[in-house]
Image (tube, rainbow, N blue to C red):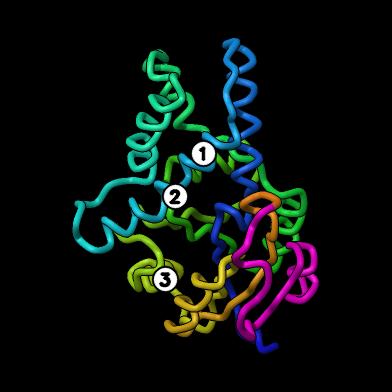
């Protein structure tokens, strides 16, 4: 483990910091109960989530102009709601559902771990989410970020180089002084190619009990931890 000289930690957010799947399902179930709706919310959420990567890849490849994740999700939400017989919901209700990503709950270890890390390091998200989403999520979950960095600022989605290099530049640091922390091996691979340090935190239930990917560190990352508490301990925070 070689982390000497690290001054800032940037965090993947969806799945690494917040438990998006459980949060969205719980939120939608509460909505459905209030509205008297009987829907397989888990299946709906899992299908809705499938829009995430293809939507961003379309932007990254140039097939689509820049668009925010909120818009990517809204287009898919309209399709999924129709499929589940919910297309008659009022527009304000659809907006409320689509903004569920702004109301995600942190993993149980996240806030305490981030608070420890903040004492020693600059901490920031480095997410494919939008600025407003990350700000609202931080307010909702008590995430103690020093600054918000994300794809919308750089008009590129991870793993495009512009996201990682842009974050390093914004922080006014050198690549090896910034550590990318993620529960996704692809994110760390990309960060490492730009000289960043890497920290893997396992989230083996991000996609539910049947998760098949990112169950463990797939390379010799600079730090490998089971949660943010262990990450903080290994980084001397």
State the extent of the magenta-drawn residues as a range.
Answer: 210-237
Query: What residue is rendered at 68% in x and 72% in y?
Result: 216
Q: Which residue is mark 3?
A: 164
Q: Nearer the viewer, mark 1 or mark 3?
A: 1
Cβ–Cβ under 8 Å for marks 1 and 3: no
Counting residues from the start of the chain, the first of labels 2 and 1 encountered is 1
Residue 129 numbered tag:
2
Q: Nearer the viewer, residue 171 or 83?
A: 83
Vertical side of 117 occupied by 46: above or below = above
Counting residues from the start of the chain, the first of labels 2 and 3 encountered is 2
Query: Residue 91 location in percent, x, y?
Result: 37, 17
Cβ–Cβ under 8 Å for marks 2 and 1: yes
Vertical side of 127 occupied by 49: above or below = above
Mark 3 crowdedness (10 Å alpha carbons): few <14, some 14-19, many ≥20? many
Q: Which residue is mark 1?
A: 101
Q: SS for tag 3?
A: helix
Query: Is 235 within the magenta?
Result: yes
Quarter where residue 23 is shown? top right
Cβ–Cβ under 8 Å for marks 2 and 3: no
Query: What residue is rendered at 64% in x and 16% in y?
Result: 33
Q: Nearer the viewer, residue 18 or 7?
A: 18
Counting residues from the start of the chain, the first of labels 1 and 3 encountered is 1
Query: What residue is rendered at 33% in x and 51% in y?
Result: 55
Vertical side of 205 occupied by 74: above or below = above
Query: Residue 74 location in percent, x, y?
Result: 36, 34
Mark 2 crowdedness (10 Å alpha carbons): few <14, some 14-19, many ≥20? many
Mark 1 crowdedness (10 Å alpha carbons): few <14, some 14-19, many ≥20? many
């Amino acid at each position: 483990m070689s982390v000497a000289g690290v001054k800032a930690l940037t965090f993947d957010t969806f799945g690494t910091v917040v438990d998006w799947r459980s949060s969205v399902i719980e939120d939608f179930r509460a909505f459905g109960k209030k509205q008297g709706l009987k829907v397989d919310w888990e299946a709906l959420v899992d299908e809705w989530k499938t829009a995430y990567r293809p939507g961003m890849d379309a932007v990254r490849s140039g097939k689509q102009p820049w668009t925010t994740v909120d818009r990517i999700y809204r287009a898919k939400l309209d399709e999924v709601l129709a499929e589940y017989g919910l297309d008659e919901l009022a527009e304000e209700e659809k907006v409320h559902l689509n903004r569920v990503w702004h109301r995600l709950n942190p993993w149980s270890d996240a806030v305490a771990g981030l608070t420890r890390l903040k004492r020693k390091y600059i901490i920031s998200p480095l997410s494919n989410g939008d600025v407003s989403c990350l700000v609202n999520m931080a307010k909702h979950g008590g995430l103690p970020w020093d600054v918000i960095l994300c794809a919308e600022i750089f008009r590129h989605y991870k793993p495009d180089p512009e996201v990682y290099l842009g974050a390093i530049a914004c922080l006014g640091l050198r690549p090896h002084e910034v550590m990318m922390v993620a529960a996704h091996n692809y994110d760390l691979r990309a960060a490492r190619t730009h000289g960043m340090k890497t920290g893997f935190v396992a989230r083996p239930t991000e996609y539910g009990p049947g998760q098949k990917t990112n169950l463990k560190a797939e390379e010799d990352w600079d730090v490998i931890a089971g949660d943010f508490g262990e990450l903080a301990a290994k980084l001397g925070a």
